[in-house]
Image: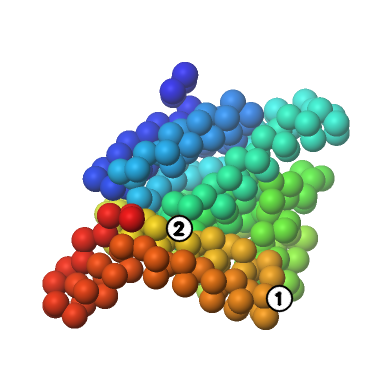
C-alpha cells in the first residue's frame, strides 16, 4: 500500500480490511476510497483468502460518513466525475465480488458508512453502534448508492422515513429492520465476526462464487427469469469437484475438504 489509510491483515483464510482514519472517525474521501479499492482487489486476487472483513480503526466509528469539508468544496460536475464516480465504482465492485464480505461495525456507521454496509453480504455490529443516512440534514441525500440499495433491502416506507428524517438508529433497531444480522458486546465483536467469517471460508469457494452470482443477478430479475438462472447455476455447480467432494464426505461421514475446483 502507498499509504496507511487502509490496513490489511490475513488470518488463515480470512482477509481483514481496516479503514484507518480514526482521527476523522474513518470518514471517506477520494484517497481513502482508492486505498480501499486497492486493498480489496489485492485480497480478492489472493486465492488463500476466502472471505473478507471490513472494519474501522479505533473504538468510535466503523465509517462515520463522508468528509463534509471535502464535499462542501465541490461543485456538481467535479463531484460527479471524481468523488461520486470513485465511490460508486468501489462500492459496486465490493458488492458484486465473488468473495463473501462481512462488516464488523465497531461504532458509528453513518452516511457513507451505512452505504458501505449496504454493499456487504453479512453485517455484525456492537450493541452501541449507530446507523443512519443523515445527509438530508446537510441539504444533501444519500449519493453513494444508499438511496437505491436501502429501498431494495428494507420496506419502502421505512427506507423513506430514515432518509427523509436523517435520524440515527440504534443497533437493535437496525437488526429489527434487517440492516444488521446480529449485535454483540463490543469486546466480542471481532471474535464473533471471525467465527462467522471462518464458517464461510470453510465452504467451497467455487460454490460460494456461483451462489453469490445467482443471488445478485436474481435480485434484479423477475421471478421466472431468476428461477431459470438458478437452475443453470446449480447445474454448473455439479460440474465442480467440490460438489462431489461434499456429497461423498456426507455419505462417508467425514468432513469435506473443499479446494475450489
Viewer-side residue, 48 vs 27: 48
Q: Position of residue 226 (x, y in %)?
A: 63, 74
Q: Report the Cα–Cα distance between label 2 and label 1.
A: 22 Å
Q: Is residue 21 left or right of residue 85?
A: left
Q: Quadrant of residue 83?
A: top right
Which circle marks residue 222 in the picture?
A: 1
Residue at image x 58%, y 45%? 93
Local crowd size for mark 2, using a 10 Å CA cut-off: few (<14), some (14–19), many (≥20): some
Q: Position of residue 165 (x, y in %)?
A: 74, 60
Residue at image x 61%, y 76%? 228
* SS state under label 2: helix
Q: Quadrant of residue 232?
A: bottom right
Residue at image x 26%, y 59%? 258
Q: Position of residue 11 (x, y in %)?
A: 26, 43
- In the depicted structure, whether residue 83 falls above or below residue 116: above
Most extreme residue toward the top is: 2
**Quarter of the image containing the N terminus?**
top left
* SS state under label 1: loop
Q: Is residue 130 visible?
A: no
Q: Is residue 99 visible?
A: yes
Local crowd size for mark 1, using a 10 Å CA cut-off: few (<14), some (14–19), many (≥20): few
Which sits earlier in the primary sequence, circle 2 or circle 1?
Answer: 2
Residue at image x 69%, y 51%? 145
Amino acid at each position: 500500500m502507498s499509504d496507511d489509510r487502509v490496513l490489511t491483515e490475513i488470518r488463515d483464510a480470512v482477509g481483514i480490511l481496516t479503514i484507518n482514519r480514526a482521527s476523522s472517525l474513518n470518514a471517506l474521501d477520494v484517497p481513502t476510497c482508492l486505498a480501499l479499492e486497492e486493498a480489496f482487489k489485492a485480497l480478492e486476487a489472493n486465492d488463500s483468502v476466502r472471505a473478507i472483513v471490513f472494519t474501522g480503526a479505533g473504538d468510535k466509528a466503523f465509517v462515520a460518513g463522508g468528509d463534509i469539508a471535502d464535499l462542501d468544496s465541490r461543485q456538481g460536475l467535479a463531484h460527479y466525475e471524481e468523488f461520486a464516480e470513485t465511490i460508486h465504482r468501489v462500492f459496486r465492485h465490493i458488492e458484486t465480488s465473488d468473495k463473501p464480505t462481512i462488516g464488523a461495525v465497531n461504532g458509528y456507521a453513518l452516511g457513507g458508512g451505512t452505504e458501505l454496509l449496504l454493499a456487504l453480504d453479512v453485517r455484525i455490529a456492537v450493541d452501541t453502534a449507530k446507523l443512519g443516512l443523515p445527509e438530508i440534514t446537510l441539504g444533501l441525500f444519500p449519493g453513494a448508492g444508499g438511496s437505491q440499495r436501502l429501498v431494495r433491502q428494507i420496506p419502502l416506507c421505512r427506507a423513506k422515513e430514515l432518509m427523509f428524517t436523517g435520524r440515527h438508529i440504534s443497533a437493535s433497531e437496525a437488526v429489527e429492520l434487517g440492516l444488521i444480522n446480529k449485535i454483540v458486546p463490543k469486546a466480542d465483536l471481532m471474535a464473533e465476526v471471525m467465527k462467522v467469517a471462518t464458517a464461510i471460508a470453510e465452504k467451497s469457494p467455487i460454490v460460494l462464487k456461483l451462489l453469490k452470482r445467482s443471488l445478485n443477478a436474481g435480485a434484479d430479475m423477475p421471478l421466472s427469469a431468476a428461477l431459470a438462472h438458478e437452475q443453470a447455476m446449480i447445474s454448473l455447480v455439479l460440474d465442480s469437484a467440490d460438489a462431489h467432494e461434499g456429497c461423498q464426505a456426507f455419505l462417508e461421514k467425514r468432513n469435506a475438504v473443499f479446494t475450489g475446483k
